[in-house]
């Protein structure tokens, strides 16, 4: 006869039941705190009446909304559907495809529900996270999971590398893009941005710290300002003898392929074939390093490049201009 009495088995302890109840209370509490500020985003394009769809979230009572750039790209009209059932035309303040972040604004006659922005700096692998969005058109869907990894890099559609990406196993599906990733307090710690097609439980969010920096620039300029040298370049592995000869502390560099006419690089004498190894003392081992260093603060500022040309290492100074896409 089978023993069906499980009451004394370790796996059925009151402690486990209490832990599951506590987990459920946290998820429910986060949903109660944040769900009213999560919106569905409907996009209409020029060629057709109805375009894409995604999610977003209000983070100020006067109607500012964070979402993904790929959700609103090439939009003729953006309509925000609130959790309260309102459909409101939204203005696109700006978007940045390089970080997949966009900023919308809706008119608010009265204060709107909003989500408090937290920080991803202190989150830990294994920490509980909650995602709310509109996957496949199912409004206000909540999923929960844990932080699977931190500091991931993710390529955007522009080819640039996004740093500071959070990996989570909280289930995300098409339509979740732009929704919030929340901590146990209901504070936004990320903007849900991508899934791996064909995989299960591998989802990514832009950290709220990075998204906030982008939002500030979009509010200020309508775009993200970045510095440019005016070159096309590629990554190259350095030969060991070159590393030893020039006393370098890196195994790769950035090779200049083309120099744009009348650019900072052209005016400074940079040439195709030059290997950029350092910028203001910082190692340039890849294009990602170069992009990371060419921030808004470097526009109009004098920079020092360390370059290997043929059998010489030379120093070049130049003044970057603003990158124009």
Image (spheres, grey):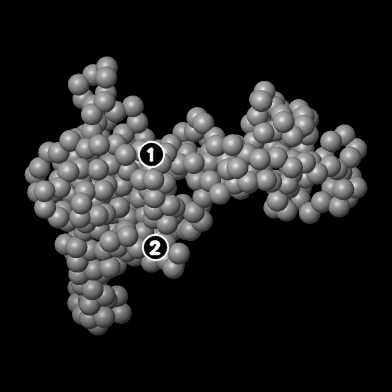
Q: Quadrant of residue 166?
A: bottom left
> Is mark 1 in CB contact (under 8 Å) with mark 2?
no
The 10 Å Cα crowd at callout 2, few under 14, some 14 to 19, many 20 or more, is some
Q: Earlier in the sequence, mark 1 or mark 2?
A: 2
Is there any visible trace of residue 100 in the rendered image?
A: no
Horizontal side, residue 135 vs residue 152: left or right: left
Q: Secondary structure at mark 2?
A: loop
- Of residues 160 and 239, which is closer to you in this image? 160
Q: Nearer the viewer, residue 42 or 282?
A: 282
Helix, strand or loop at label 1? It is loop
Between the C-alphas of marks 1 and 2, the distance is 24 Å
Q: Which residue is mark 2?
A: 119
Q: Residue at x 77, y 45 (%)?
A: 306
Give residue 287's mark: none
Label 1 vs label 2, nearer the camera = 1
Residue 78 falls in which quadrant of the image? Answer: top left
Residue 98 vs 127, above or below: the answer is above
x and y percent of residue 91 in the render? 25, 37
Q: Residue at x 32, y 43 (%)?
A: 103
Q: Residue 191: horizontal and vertical position, in percent?
A: 35, 50
**Image quadrant in which you'd find residue 105:** top left
Q: Quadrant of the N terminus?
A: bottom left
At which x and y percent is residue 240? 85, 46
> 248 above or below 1?
above
Residue to which mark 1 is pinned: 222
> How far across and down, in percent of the image, does residue 187 sit?
29, 62
Between 2 and 27, the residue placed more toward the observer is 27
Residue at the image point whose x is 90% and y is 38% from the top? 311
């Amino acid at each position: 006869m089978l023993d069906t009495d499980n009451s004394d088995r370790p796996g059925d302890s009151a402690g486990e039941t209490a832990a599951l109840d506590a987990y459920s209370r946290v998820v429910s509490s986060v949903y109660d705190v944040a769900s009213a500020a999560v919106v569905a985003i409907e996009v209409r394009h020029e060629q057709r009446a109805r375009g894409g769809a995604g999610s977003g979230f209000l983070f100020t009572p006067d109607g500012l909304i964070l979402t993904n750039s790929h959700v609103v790209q090439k939009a003729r009209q953006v309509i925000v559907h609130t959790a309260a059932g309102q459909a409101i035309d939204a203005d696109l303040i700006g978007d940045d495809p390089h970080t997949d972040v966009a900023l919308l604004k809706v008119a608010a006659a009265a204060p709107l529900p909003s989500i408090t922005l937290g920080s991803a700096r202190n989150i830990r692998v294994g920490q509980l996270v909650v995602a709310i969005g509109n996957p496949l058109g199912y409004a206000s869907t909540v999923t929960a999971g844990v932080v699977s990894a931190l500091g991931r890099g993710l390529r955007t559609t522009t080819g640039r590398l996004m740093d500071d990406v959070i990996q989570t196993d909280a289930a995300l599906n098409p339509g979740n893009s732009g929704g919030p990733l929340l901590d146990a307090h209901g504070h936004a710690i990320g903007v849900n941005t991508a899934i791996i097609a064909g995989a299960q439980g591998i989802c990514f969010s832009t950290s709220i710290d990075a998204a906030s920096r982008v939002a500030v620039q979009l509010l200020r300029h309508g775009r993200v300002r970045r510095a440019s040298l005016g070159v096309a370049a590629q990554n190259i592995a350095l030969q060991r003898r070159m590393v030893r000869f020039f006393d370098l502390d890196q195994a790769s560099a950035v090779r200049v392929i083309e120099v744009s006419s009348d650019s900072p690089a052209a005016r400074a004498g940079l040439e195709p074939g030059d290997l950029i190894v350092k910028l203001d003392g910082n190692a340039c081992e890849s294009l990602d390093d170069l992009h990371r260093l060419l921030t808004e603060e470097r526009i109009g500022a004098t920079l020092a490049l360390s370059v290997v040309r043929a059998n010489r290492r030379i120093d070049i100074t130049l003044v970057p201009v603003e990158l124009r896409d």
